[in-house]
Amino acid sequence: MAKASVPIVRPAASASVRAAEGEYRPGPYLIDGGWLSAKAGKLWNWWQAGYSPQPYGEANAMVEACVSAYSQTVAMCPGDHWRTTASGGRERVTTSALARLLRNPNDYQSISDLLLNLVRRLYAHGEGFGYGVRNDRNEISELHLMAHGMPLIGVDGSIYYDLSGNEIAERRFDFSIPVPARDVLHVRLHTPRHPLKGVSPILATVLERAMAGAALNQQVAFYLNQARPSFMLETEQQLTKDQSEDLRMRWNDQTQGEKAGGTPILSWGLKAKPVSISPADARLADMLKITDQSIALAFRMPMAVLGIGDTPFASTEALMSSWKASGFGFCLNHIEEALGLLFRLKGQPEEYVEFDTAALMRSNFKERMEGWAIATKSGLSINEFRNAEGYPTTAHGDSPRVQQQMVPLSYGAAMQPPDPNKNSSTGAKARRRAGR
């Protein structure tokens, strides 16, 4: 790895004009370990005031479901290097460095492992990094996923990266000097603060996750009987302190520990009154449902993909098509374009990377066969269908076939094509010679 000769500077934390030294900067603030709120940032001793940074990818079941759905689904799609041919079709390139990397990115990870963790970091942290190792032919022969990356900008505008977070790669390669951008795979989402710093859609769900967390913590405290009894004993008689303690001890003796489930005998007009959940707490399920819908909306994730709610689609293919037309389609295209940039491809439509989403329909045999039945009647050959499904080529199966009645209206009642020599001078001469 050649040492950089261009001086580099770290990017500003914000795209706006920087405040002067010592001047107050409005929050929230991105610090090590998460985000610090603007209110806490006003205090220099915020940790002593009871504030703590909020983790960037704070745990939440719906957030985890959305991030896992994207990462696991992308990992299911095999990628290929494609090139457009002169005839207007396309051919799969199998001998390029990119084609080899899409099968074996390195010696300790499969392409599924790499894509799974790359997309997970992309949606959990807003960006993902990979380090490309070049061989003697200056081709990228290995790609190593890096957990952390910091873009560095030279005084001439050159871009470098400070990479870390992969113990295997750090033992094999020297990361003490910045890595040129041409050797770095950098996939990032929205860049509101800096063109090289992506942010996750998780940031748009801070309030929803805070509300759900507060509600669930309250319920946990209730069920753990934290300062809230499950039963109250009521009586109209005046009881002394000793009598109250004696009754409490007798009640606990029959309802806790090894004697739990016993039958307490009440006297002095005592009545046991259960402490029930208030109507406001009973609406917790509805509130959490709204929170989950807001998080799924931020991730552009159809609830039906997660198995929640009713499915408004007639088939699995229609459901996946809806997701591919929105959030998932963008995710795939974003990664394809990032790989194309790393390998200096010409881009659509000449040369590009494409992940095959047909693998998502692998278990839907009936829908696949129905689709191929229509395709083979509309211009695709039998061998194209057989090869796509893993069957060998059959004789006479390369020519597209259509039904015999699919003919132009010019065929007429005789069901024969019109004579091309009719009404032409050449045809007239030919008929005169045939008459002699």
Image (tube, rainbow, N blue to C red):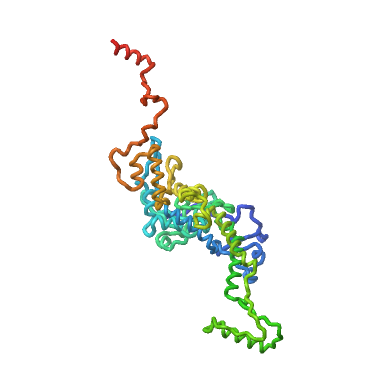
Say which of 3 and 213 sits in front.
Answer: 213
Compared with 299, 54 (above or below) is below
Q: Residue at x 60, y 65 (%)?
A: 284
Instruction: Identify which residue, 239 or 270, lies in the foreground.
Output: 270
Would residue 351 be seen by someone viewing this image from the given angle? yes
Look at the image and tell me in which quarter the C terminus lies.
top left
- 114 or 75: nearer the viewer: 75
| Residue at 39% from the left image edge and 24% from the top image edge | 413
**Left or right of residue 66, residue 369 in this image:** left
Name the quadrant containing residue 73.
Answer: bottom left
Q: Position of residue 8 (x, y in %)?
A: 53, 54
- Residue 395, horizontal then vertical, whole percent: 28, 40
Which x, y percent locates residue 25?
A: 65, 59
Q: At x 41% / y 44%, what residue is drawn?
A: 371
Q: Is residue 51 left or right of residue 69?
A: right
Rendering quarter of residue 47: bottom right
Q: Residue at x 33, y 36 (%)?
A: 399
Total tally of numbered discs in the picture:
0
Question: Where residue 95 sits in the image (x, y, percent)?
Answer: 34, 46
